[in-house]
Image: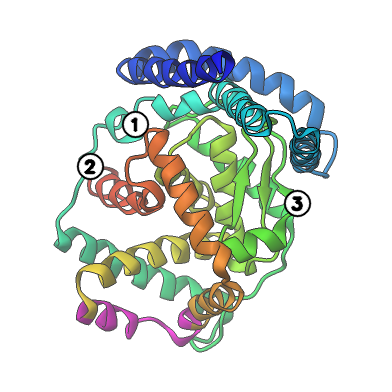
C-alpha cells in the first residue's frame, strides 16, 4: 500500500509543480521551449526523419501490447491482484505524465500568441460577421478562379509530399514575422491508425514522445493541406490547438498555389460559419446562401464524410481529449480549436489578413 500511496503523492506533486510553472510563462519560453525542447526535438527528429513509417505509431502498438500482457500476468498470479494492478496502473500513469510533460507538454504553458502580438482575446458579433463575409467573398473568388465555374467543387491531388513541401515553405515566410521556432521537423506521416482516427473524429495528431506528426489519410483532400500545417505547428512547440489552427491557416494562405490558398480560406470560413450558427441561425443561413454552389459542395463533402464515419467512439474520444486539454492549460477543452476564430478576427483587425 505504501508504493501505491507514493505514486499517488508523486502525481499530485507533479500537478502542483506544473501549476507553479504555469505562473511563469516567460521562463517556460526561455528555458524550456527555446532551449530544452529544441534540443530534444533535434535528437528525436534525427532518429525518425529517415522513414515515412510512423515510428511513434509502432511504439504505441508495442507499449499497448506490453501493458496488456503485464496486467494479464498480474491477474493470472491471483495474489493481491487488485493491489498489484492498481500499483502498475499508477506507475504507468506517472511515467506517462513525466515523459509527456518533459518531451512536449510544458509547451502548453507558453506565452499565448495573442499576448505576443498584443491582440484582444474576445470579439463582437459584428466582427465575426465582417470576417465571415470577407472570407465568403475570397473563397468564392478563389473557387471560380480554379474551376472557372461557380457550380463545380475544387478537386486536387491527394499528395502528402506536396502538402509537406508547401507547409515547409509557408512556415519559412512566417518565421520572419512570428516567434516560431526555426527547427528542422520531419514530414507529417500517414498514420497507421487512420481508420481509428476517422471513427473517433480526428484529422491528425502529434506523438509527444517521438515528435512525429501523423495525418488521417482518409479525410477529404480539401482539408489535408491545413491539417498538415497544423500538425507541423505542434512539432514547432505550438501546443495550443487554436494557435496551431491559426498558424496552419497562415502557412497555407501564404502559398503561390491557388489550391492551397483556397483550402486555407475554406478551412477558416467553416470555423467562422460554425460560430455564426451558434449565435444566430438566421445569419448563418444568409451567409450560407451567399456561397458558390461549388464551395457548398466542398463543405458538404467534408460534412458527409464525418457524419458517415461517425461512431460511438467519437463522443468518448472527444470527451477524453477535451478533458486532457483542460488539464494541460487549454481551459476550453475541445472548444479550444474554435478559439482560432478569436485569433483570426483580432489579427485581421490589427494586421489585415491578405
Q: How much space separates mark 1 and mark 3, taking CA atoms?
A: 31 Å
- Where disc 3 sits, the SS reads helix
Q: Out of 175 and 242, give the one closest to the viewer.
A: 242
Q: How much space separates mark 3 and mark 2, taking CA atoms?
A: 35 Å
Q: Residue at x 29, y 45 (%)?
A: 347
**In which image quadrant can residue 53 be found?**
top right
Q: Which residues are magenta?
A: 282-296
Q: How much space separates mark 2 and mark 1, taking CA atoms?
A: 10 Å
Earlier sequence position, callout 3 versus callout 2: 2
* Secondary structure, magenta segment, majority class: helix
According to the picture, the residue beneath numbered tag 2 turns out to be: 121
Query: Is residue 135 inside the magenta stretch?
Result: no
According to the picture, the residue beneath numbered tag 3 turns out to be: 161
According to the picture, the residue beneath numbered tag 1 turns out to be: 112
Q: Position of residue 103 (x, y in %)?
A: 60, 23
Decide: is 282 above or below 242.
below
* Pointers 1 and 3 in contact (C-beta within 8 Å): no
Q: Out of 43 and 288, give the one closest to the viewer.
A: 43
- Where disc 1 sits, the SS reads loop
Is disc 2 surrounded by few (<14), some (14 to 19) or many (20+) residues within 10 Å?
A: few
Decide: is 201 above or below 56.
below
Amino acid at each position: 500500500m505504501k508504493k501505491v500511496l507514493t505514486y499517488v503523492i508523486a502525481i499530485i506533486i507533479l500537478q502542483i509543480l506544473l501549476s507553479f510553472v504555469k505562473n511563469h510563462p516567460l521562463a517556460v519560453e526561455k528555458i524550456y521551449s527555446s532551449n530544452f525542447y529544441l534540443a530534444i526535438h533535434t535528437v528525436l527528429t534525427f532518429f525518425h526523419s529517415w522513414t515515412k513509417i510512423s515510428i511513434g505509431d509502432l511504439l504505441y502498438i508495442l507499449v499497448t501490447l506490453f501493458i496488456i500482457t503485464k496486467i494479464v500476468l498480474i491477474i493470472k498470479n491471483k495474489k493481491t491482484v487488485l493491489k498489484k494492478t492498481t500499483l502498475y496502473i499508477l506507475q504507468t500513469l506517472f511515467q506517462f505524465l513525466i515523459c509527456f510533460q518533459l518531451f512536449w507538454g510544458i509547451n502548453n504553458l507558453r506565452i499565448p500568441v495573442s499576448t505576443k502580438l498584443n491582440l484582444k482575446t474576445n470579439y463582437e458579433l459584428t466582427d465575426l460577421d465582417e470576417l465571415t463575409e470577407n472570407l465568403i467573398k475570397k473563397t468564392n473568388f478563389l473557387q471560380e478562379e480554379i474551376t472557372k465555374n461557380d457550380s463545380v467543387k475544387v478537386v486536387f491531388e491527394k499528395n502528402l509530399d506536396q502538402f509537406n513541401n508547401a507547409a515547409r515553405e509557408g512556415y519559412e515566410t512566417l518565421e520572419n514575422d512570428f516567434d516560431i521556432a526555426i527547427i528542422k521537423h520531419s514530414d507529417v506521416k500517414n498514420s497507421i491508425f487512420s481508420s481509428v482516427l476517422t471513427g473517433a473524429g480526428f484529422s491528425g495528431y502529434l506523438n509527444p514522445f517521438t515528435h512525429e506528426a501523423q495525418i488521417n489519410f482518409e479525410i477529404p483532400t480539401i482539408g489535408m493541406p491545413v491539417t498538415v500545417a497544423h500538425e507541423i505547428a505542434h512539432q514547432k512547440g505550438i501546443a495550443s490547438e487554436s494557435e496551431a489552427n491559426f498558424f496552419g491557416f497562415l502557412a497555407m494562405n501564404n502559398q503561390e498555389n491557388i489550391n492551397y490558398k483556397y483550402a486555407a480560406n475554406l478551412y477558416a470560413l467553416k470555423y467562422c460559419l460554425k460560430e455564426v450558427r451558434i449565435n444566430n441561425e438566421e445569419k448563418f443561413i444568409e451567409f450560407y446562401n451567399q456561397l458558390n454552389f461549388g464551395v457548398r459542395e466542398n463543405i458538404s463533402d467534408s460534412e458527409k464524410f464525418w457524419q458517415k464515419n461517425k461512431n460511438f467512439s467519437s463522443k468518448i474520444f472527444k470527451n477524453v481529449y477535451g478533458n486532457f486539454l483542460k488539464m494541460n492549460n487549454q481551459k476550453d477543452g475541445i472548444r479550444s480549436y474554435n478559439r482560432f476564430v478569436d485569433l483570426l478576427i483580432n489579427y485581421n483587425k490589427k494586421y489585415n489578413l491578405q
